[in-house]
Amino acid sequence: MASCSATSALSLCSLLKLNCRVSPAHKNFPFLPLSVSRKRILSPPSLSFSFKKNPRIAPPRFSESEAPVIEVEAGPVPESEPAQIVETSSEVPKREEVFAVVMIGSRQYIVFPGRFIYTQRLKGANVDDKIILNKVLLVGTKTSTHIGKPVVPNAAVHAVVEEQVLDKKVTVFKYKKKKKYRRNIGHRQPITRIRITGITGYQDSPAVTLDSL
Amino acid sequence: MTRIRQGYIARRRRAKIRLFASSFRGAHSRLTRTIIQQRIRALVSSHRDRDRQKRDFRRLWITRINAVIRESGVSYSYSRFIHNLYKRQLLLNRKILAQIAIFNRNCLYMISNEIIK
């Protein structure tokens, strides 16, 4: 798929080059500051759906298999492979016991690899799109935590959009007594279900460990 | 004009309302006119409390964070913790801090140590 190769092209580009600037064709991907909300990127629906705000330098490290790291560092690789390897390595049953706190749509979520979360509707993301969340505020393992000030540098949470769905119906009932005023309105909020596949890129940042307590 | 019986129209309307109030206590789930009133009260409460929910949860999180923070250090409290949090430019919100306090308390201690420095 064109968008898939564009996605992996983006990711490859960032992996291999320093200060990778996305090509001028993707004009809406400037080097955005971290505090910009995700809505900025979502306007052109035809562009690739990897929501990388700042193309990062660090290669993704998957504890499940070493194959992707080696292949990426080798250089010339068929572009579709890293994307596929990302997907298959996340199916391996062994999971790292990491968690991250990620900010999506100005809400914060605690995120574990392999589980899903419901967020506000991400416009422009289709089902089975891979998403990279860059606003990682905290990454924790059993023995150490990487605290972000305010964001953990180079950390990224990889996720896959599972479905774009409407929330359960909420009845908004407005009523004033003795004034013959009642309004009955139903509301279903559009949400997106996202499955977290991995948390990467946090190893470099300074960690606080249990020993220092 | 031909005579028209009401038929099942009112019954179907009231059945829906009765279904809504089917788990209410006593007469509130049995008597039709009471059911209608109680349904209105229930919906109004839920609408009002959806806004209160946001306030209530924030209070709960603050209480929980306060409880955990006071254990570490003599005169350390929630207010000082939050002040340090802002000084150090951390963006974690109270919901996450309260969750961390329950699920991974060491992590919270690490954060507070990191901030105090």
Image (cartoon, coloured by chain):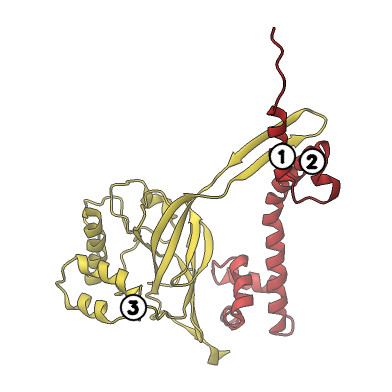
Chain colours: A yellow, B red
Q: Nearer the viewer, mark 2 or mark 3?
A: 2
Q: Circle 3 sits on which residue?
A: A62
Type of the residue with mark 3: Phe
Say left or right for B6 vs A43.
right
Residue B114 visible, this orientation:
yes
Mark 1–mark 2 CB contact (< 8 Å)? yes
- Mark 1 crowdedness (10 Å alpha carbons): few <14, some 14-19, many ≥20: some
Residue appearing at x 72%, y 29% in the figure: B10
Say left or right for B48 vs A191.
right
Q: Position of residue A75 (x, y in %)?
A: 16, 74
Q: Circle 2 sits on which residue?
A: B35
Q: Position of residue B5 (x, y in %)?
A: 72, 20
The answer for which chain carries disc 1 is B
Disc marking residue B17: 1
Q: Position of residue A57 (x, y in %)?
A: 29, 72
Q: B116 or B23: which is nearer to us? A: B23
Q: Are marks 1 and 2 on the same chain?
A: yes
Looking at the image, is B55 positioned above or below residue A99?
above
Q: Tell me the distance, in whole angstroms, between the alpha carbons under discs 1 and 2.
A: 7 Å
Type of the residue with mark 2: Ile
Looking at the image, is A45 positioned above or below residue B67?
above
